[in-house]
Image (cartoon, rainbow, N blue to C red):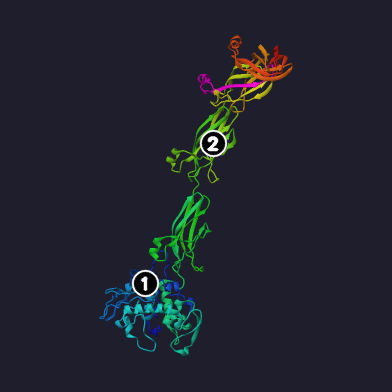
Amino acid sequence: MTNPRPARGTLGRAAAAAVACFATALALVLTQAPAPARAADMGAFDAGYIISDAIFFDSGTMTAASVQSFLTAKGAACVPSAGNTCLKDYTYQPPSSGPQTKSADSYCAAYTPAAGDNAGTLIAKVAVACGINPQVIVVTLQKEQGLVTAPRGGSSGTYQIAMGYGCPDSAACDTQYYGFSNQLYNAAHQFQRYTHNPTSYNFQVGITNQILYSPNTACGRKAVVIQNQATANLYDYTPYTPNAAALAAGYGTGDSCSSYGNRNFWEFFSDWFGSPTQRLPIGSVDTISAASPTLITVAGWALDPDTTSPINVNVIIDGALAGTPLADGSRPDVDAAFHKGANHGFYAQFASQPGTHQVCVWAMDSGGHGPNPEIGCKSVTLVNHAPIGSLDTVTGNPTSITVAGWALDPDTSAPANVHVYIDNTLVGAPAASSPRSDIAQIFGLGADHGFYQVYPASGGSHQVCVYAMDTLGRGPNPLLGCRTVTVNNRAPMASLDALTATSSSITVAGWALDPDTTASINIHVYVDGTFVDAPLADGSRPDVGRAFGDGDAHGFYKTYPVAAGSHQVCLYAMDSSGRGPNPQFACRTITVVNQAPFGSVDTAFGSASAITVAGWALDPDTQASISVRVSVDGQTVGTAPASGSRPDVGQAFGKGDLHGFYLTYPATAGAHQVCVSALDSSGNGPDPQIGCRSVTVTG
């Protein structure tokens, strides 16, 4: 398919092309720098890179209202002559055939102009439908017919070919493309056709293109390596490049070989909208504030109009680079305003020191070549507040000192430490982290700011001082208070209520307590100067509890085995703190005597092949039953307990009834001597013989 060739865009096509324009571009956002008030520097014109793809295809740079405002500002001096219309005053009136509606295709979305649409609305509709920057369309209107700044407006014929579309250099314009709305759409549509079919047209990206200086081929050509598709589109639309004379003339006239279409496009765009190849990043610093005494918060947004991708910002603190966070946080408000996506927010924190700091933020160009404009600068002061607190109580205990209170650093909700000094010596640096709901209610920094500590101390008077420590470790560390306390360790007290002996042991019983505590304490037991035990006096003694008010668990009752004889027993009450004193509360002598057992052989007789013996035996050292040993003819035949019931023995000796024996042993026929011995209960003897009998055993 052969597409109509557009006009060549020479000075003749754009009657106003030689009129220098020094007006500034419409400010789209507060942070966008205005266009320079003088003509663009033509020395910066690059024939191979006239406009970037990002800018050329950015359809969201201007709304319909902002386009119309721009046209009104640029055409403010326009006073239409007879039959002419100023572009700022143009309104669309559909031709008799109806509105020039365009259906959607592979290049553009559907486009429908409406009766009464002004030029700004038509331009914005076409820009959105075909994905072309409305600024490109505005500049093309200017470089083709000079309509934007025409001082007397344009004729109906001028509006018919407003974009120069369908007007080849060597033939009349094609009437099927007539009409202002039709021209806008078809020119934008053609730009997309070039883009989608890059190899189907004369000028291509990445190769050396021989581009004429003017329609006069005798003027020669320039070898140009076109760097991007948008630049190729401009050459496909207007197939000439300016020569040196055209560039030197600015908006003026060069020589006979000069052409001006692409020169004028670059120059008008630069003067009206800024660089066509490099747009300034924009942004806003919403917050520069102190997050803590050592932390600065910086937040805002930044974007590069040349891309939808996030860009970095440089944060400078006191002239030094502090960080380069990526502005990729979600900011739907920024997307709604600039249509570059939502991921352009930044939020970062930087460590610093207390004091006043100058914080500045620069938005960094996405290409890495700049410019990188400053988007915000502010002075911020970091203040390190002194900790506060209270020394609520200092108490002296028998062997220790208790300190309690609260402390916090207003700069943080984290617990602060306190330093505790006793007699000018640091004894602890605990964190004030115990719950204190009252402190949370008052200061709103959480509840974990209480302290309660116990430190060992010797008896006597002591000075205790507590300091609240700055969480930064830089101070100040204020004194919360100093107190003088007395440590008094009272001696334990005790009583030996009973000291008794058996034939092989001694028993101690009594009570012991330390008036400094309700807890049970130990006693130490010595026998004949030798330590034998350290029992805990924790037996129930309600009488002691009633008497001293320190609880009932202070009794002791212990038995220790000892040899027979005289023994010295001494007891000590042990201080609960382990530091003493440990007073001796008893020292007595007791004798351990092992009495000989005794008994009686009441009867012994022989029968067929057996001997029977009966009687009783007991040990006066115990009520327990003891054993007896039976021998026949001097040979032991058995040992058995004397545990049978003998109430008569119990009544006689007061050692219980279970001391009788009745025993039978096999024996040979004939006469025999039977003897019985009582065995000592301790096992240590003596074991006296309690009776012998002569008996005869029948065969």
- The residue singled out by tag 1 in the image is 128
Q: Nearer the viewer, residue 315 or 104?
A: 104
- The amino acid type found where label 1 is placed reads Val
Q: In terms of sequence position, does the residue under pointer 2 or pointer 1 come before the other?
A: 1
Q: Nearer the viewer, residue 454 or 668?
A: 668
Q: Position of residue 614 (x, y in %)?
A: 64, 14
Marks 2/1 in contact by CB < 8 Å: the verdict is no
Q: Position of residue 568 (x, y in %)?
A: 67, 17
Confirm whether residue 38 shows in the render.
no
Q: For mark 2, does the 10 Å Cα neighbourhood hold few (<14), some (14 to 19), or many (20 or more) residues?
A: many
Q: Is residue 430 above or below residue 694?
A: below
Q: Position of residue 143 (x, y in %)?
A: 39, 79
- The residue singled out by tag 2 in the image is 466
Q: Is residue 292 above or below residue 68?
A: above
Q: Nearer the viewer, residue 570 or 580?
A: 570
Is label 1 in a helix, a strand or a loop?
A: helix
Q: Is residue 480 left or right of residue 695?
A: left
- Quadrant occupied by the C terminus: top right
Q: Is residue 339 left or right of residue 577?
A: left
Asked if residue 597 is among those painted magenta in the image, a careful observer would answer no
- What residue occupies the far left of the structure in this picture? 96
- Quadrant occupied by the N terminus: bottom left
Q: Which residues are magenta?
A: 540-567
- The amino acid type found where label 2 is placed reads Val
